[in-house]
Image: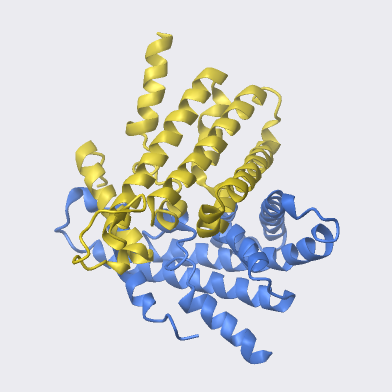
């Protein structure tokens, strides 16, 4: 059981990396990976929200929707839970942790449309994970995503020092290519778990 | 006057404010489902349908929806239509549904729809919103098909399932996987940015 959980975690971080294998959360990925600071701020907020929504969504799906035979509407339910969670987290942080709020508060509203969050909830249903497995999986996916965005942001920051680059390639174009090369290297992890 | 505004709306959608290339919206699905043309067409059609439906509903209800809860209203509207798309795909195109499965659900978080709802439909009438949805959906679809055409041709040697490359050509397996998606879309962005001259400083 313990080994199984470790495997799920490692798989979620490396071999099934959200950004490089499933291509999730690309919109914030492109716009935020310009500086290391914003990337890590966003990453911290994402870890928090993804794990929390998995903790909430699993019981809702398995204890409410399945017994009521209403799996059909789970898209609506999940997205409302996510939007609500984000709102709630924002309010709680504003009230009790103003320092934290100042650090990554601006990233919170953006998380609702980060598709990684919704994808984790959908995947945990498709993969039929148990409660504990789902939470570990969600945490792992979030860690994998933050690793990816931080690596790309760090490389991109160094690239600022390079002058010679085609004009059209600057910005999103080069981020795509960097991500592509990193995705190639992450392929090396496949078959590990 | 009215006609020139409509033309402007369409042109903005399909080229000037291209949702993928210049606004960088909806990248996730553009990358993830573009390994084969048929998947790209299915995804493009799905997004276009949801865009149209959301555009109609939001532009009709824009005076009734209170500002504070508009996001939630958009989300519920979008999610309801995505469920329809998901069901239709499952019923009529089970193979495509299997291969792009969870990404259909992710249309909900496709920022194109949210972005257009917040940026255009909420401030424009039904006709303009309809045109905007149509042109944005079309722009998104042709981008997906363009990426998919390159990836399918090099990765599988086929176009829409028909073999076009000779057997002797080695298949670029990497093109059908995640890295290929990044490289092809990155190159396309490079090309379109160079043509349109919208470069970053």
Seen in the picture, residue A164 relative to B128 is either above or below; the reply is: below
How did the renderer colour the structure?
A: by chain
B137 relative to B149 in the view: left or right: right
Q: Which residue is pictured at 25% across the width and 42% down the height?
A: B192
Task: Determine the image quadrant of residue A186.
Answer: bottom left
A99 relative to A60 in the view: left or right: left
Relative image position of residue B51 (x, y in whole percent): 54, 35
- Chain A visual colour: blue
Name the image quarter holding the N terminus of chain A.
bottom right
Q: Nearer the viewer, residue B169 or A37?
A: B169
Residue B125 visible somewhere in the drawing: no
Q: Which residue is pictured at 60% across the width and 25% down the height?
A: B59
Chain coloured yellow in the rendered structure: B
Q: Nearer the viewer, residue A43 or B145?
A: B145
Relative image position of residue A117 (x, y in whole percent): 59, 60
Q: Which residue is pictured at 73% across the width and 74% down the height?
A: A131
């Amino acid at each position: 059981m313990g080994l199984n959980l470790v495997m799920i975690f490692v798989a979620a971080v490396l071999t099934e990396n959200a950004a490089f294998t499933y291509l999730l959360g690309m919109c914030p990925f492109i716009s935020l990976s310009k500086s290391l600071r914003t990337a890590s701020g966003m990453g911290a907020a994402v870890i928090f929200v993804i794990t929390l929504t998995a903790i909430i969504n699993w019981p809702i799906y398995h204890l409410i929707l399945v017994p009521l035979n209403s799996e059909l509407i789970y898209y609506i339910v999940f997205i409302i839970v996510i939007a609500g969670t984000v709102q709630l987290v924002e309010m709680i942080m504003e009230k009790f942790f103003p320092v934290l709020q100042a650090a990554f508060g601006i990233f919170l509203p953006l998380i609702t449309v980060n598709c990684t969050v919704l994808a984790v909830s959908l995947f945990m249903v498709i993969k039929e994970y148990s409660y504990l497995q789902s939470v570990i999986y969600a945490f792992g996916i979030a860690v994998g995503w933050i690793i990816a965005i931080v690596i790309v942001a760090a490389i991109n920051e160094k690239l600022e020092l390079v002058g010679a680059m085609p004009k059209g390639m600057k910005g999103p174009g080069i981020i795509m290519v960097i991500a592509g090369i990193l995705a190639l290297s992450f392929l090396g992890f496949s078959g590990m778990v | 006057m009215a006609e020139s505004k409509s033309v402007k709306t369409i042109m903005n959608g399909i080229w000037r404010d291209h949702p993928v290339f210049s606004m960088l919206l909806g990248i996730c699905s553009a990358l993830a489902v573009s390994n084969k043309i048929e998947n790209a067409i299915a995804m493009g059609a799905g997004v276009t349908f949801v865009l149209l439906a959301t555009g109609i509903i939001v532009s009709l209800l824009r005076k009734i929806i209170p500002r504070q809860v508009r996001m939630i209203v958009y989300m519920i509207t979008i999610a309801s239509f995505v469920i329809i798309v998901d069901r239709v795909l499952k019923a009529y195109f089970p193979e495509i549904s299997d291969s792009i499965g969870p990404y259909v659900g992710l249309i909900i978080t496709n920022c194109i729809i949210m972005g257009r709802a917040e940026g255009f439909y909420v401030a424009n009438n039904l006709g303009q919103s309809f045109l905007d949805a149509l042109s944005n959906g079309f722009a998104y679809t042709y981008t997906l098909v363009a990426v998919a055409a390159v990836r399918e041709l090099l990765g599988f040697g086929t176009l829409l399932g028909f073999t076009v490359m000779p057997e002797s050509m080695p298949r670029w397996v990497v093109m059908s996987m995640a890295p290929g998606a990044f490289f092809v879309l990155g190159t396309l962005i490079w090309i379109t940015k160079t043509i349109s001259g919208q470069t970053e400083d």
